[in-house]
Amino acid sequence: MRPLLDGILAIHYNSIMIKRYYSGKISKLLKPNKVLVLYGPRQVGKTTLLKEFLKTYKGKVYSSTGENSSLQKVLESSDFSKIIPFFKGYDLIAIDEAQKIENVGQGLKIIVDQIEGIKVIATGSSSFDLSNKLGEPLVGRQRIKKLFPLSVMELSDNYGGMFPREELENLLVYGSYPEIITAKSYSEKKDYLIQIRDSYLYKDILEFEKIKNNRKILDLLRLIAFQIGSEVSLQEIGNSLNLGKNTVERYLDLLEKSFVLINVRGFSKNLRKEVTKMSRYYFYDTGIRNAVIENFNPIENRNDIGALWENYIVMERLKKQAYRPIYSNNYFWRTYDQKEIDWVEERDGKLYGYEIKWSNKRHKEPKLWKETYDNAEFKIINQDNYLDFVS
């Protein structure tokens, strides 16, 4: 593994204010009588992004958090006579951690419907909670943007195009949370990831779903961490954890909706040879994945580099799709006789298959894929060409 940058260069890298993809874009994303929603995992920089934007905003602002009891009381009331006088006279309303307010969507709907020209921005770390509270009341009244751990695009913009390549091994092992990128030592990186794992990773689920036994969730994540790039059997996981299949399915759904895991389904045109009913799971961040299994070994001492690489490429591709944006349905493809393609995109009426390989060895396009989908493209993504794919 490359040593951490040191000397003057390290001071420069570690002291820089990291510019996010949406830095400088918030003003254009905000529209009168609409709610701009910034979703994302905890600790990825939503609050920092919001604060930096508010420093430059020229209008009259009401800014608070979902933990403000006075704000909770007003918005949770859904009472026009309380809400409108409270917010009238402001140009912008900014609410951080909005998921902590019950029925926040109904309160925000009243604001954008009744106060002419008002702009609203809300951040939240819990997708399942915010979607329940915002989704239905704000149909046609919201614009949603997702914030991830730092992308290759952002790292290149901040540190130069060589940084993602030179730091690749560290990114695979420790991930790309902002605090990880600016940490000055490996021990600092490890401590931070363990803190996220123990203090933040399950917080939304434990708070909002009243799940008391986070040990089962951690055990579930460990099993998933060892199955990156493979189909996951809910029945087998349930048997291993002494949990019912429905409970496993519910926990996995919550982990998706709280930005811990990504679920990818199998692609098929209903051919009997193709696997479609099972899922593959990836972690939002490889550092979190390694914290879950408590393995921060350098890649030359690991036997899971293929899984790490696949997880990393999948997430970086999803970041690119979200930020550019690229509109795509994403799948994997596999047959019952073990022919497979790791990543399949269905976009603009065409199929694109990508096999993700750490090794630069040649890999043939599966014959059945070519015969079945003769107009589909196929490409190997490896260390030589991955930057074009993700940035």
Image: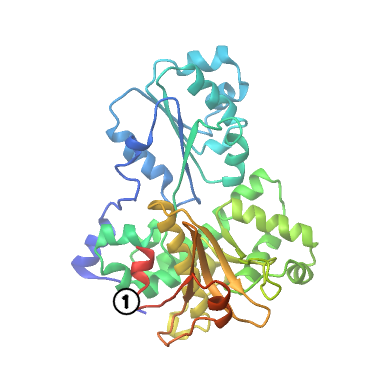
Question: Looking at this view, is 157 or 75 the one in front?
Answer: 157
For image coordinates 76% across by 57% down, the residue present is 247
User: Residue 358 location, x and y as percent?
Assistant: 44, 80
Q: Circle 1 is placed at which residue position?
A: 3
User: Residue 158 location, x and y as percent?
Assistant: 27, 57
For image coordinates 61% across by 42% down, the residue present is 129
Q: Quadrant of the N terminus?
A: bottom left
Question: Looking at this view, is 96 or 294 the one in front?
Answer: 96
Taking the image as shown, residue 170 lies to the left or right of residue 129, namely left
Q: Amino acid at mark 1?
A: Pro
For image coordinates 46% across by 59% down, the residue present is 318
Specify the farthest residue to the bottom: 361
* Quarter occupied by residue 360: bottom left
What's the coloring here? Answer: rainbow
Taking the image as shown, residue 107 lies to the left or right of residue 177, namely right
Specify the farthest residue to the left: 8
Residue 190 in view in this figure: yes
Question: Looking at this view, is 310 or 183 the one in front?
Answer: 310
User: Residue 39 location, x and y as percent?
Assistant: 49, 45
SS of the residue at dot 1?
Answer: loop
For image coordinates 41% across by 22% down, the residue present is 118
Q: Quadrant of the C terminus?
A: bottom left
Q: Is residue 305 above or below residue 314?
A: below
User: Residue 185 location, x and y as percent?
Assistant: 36, 68
Residue 149 in view in this figure: no
How many marks overall? Answer: 1
Q: Is residue 155 above or below residue 384?
A: above
Within-10-Å neighbours for mark 1: few <14, some 14–19, many 20+: few
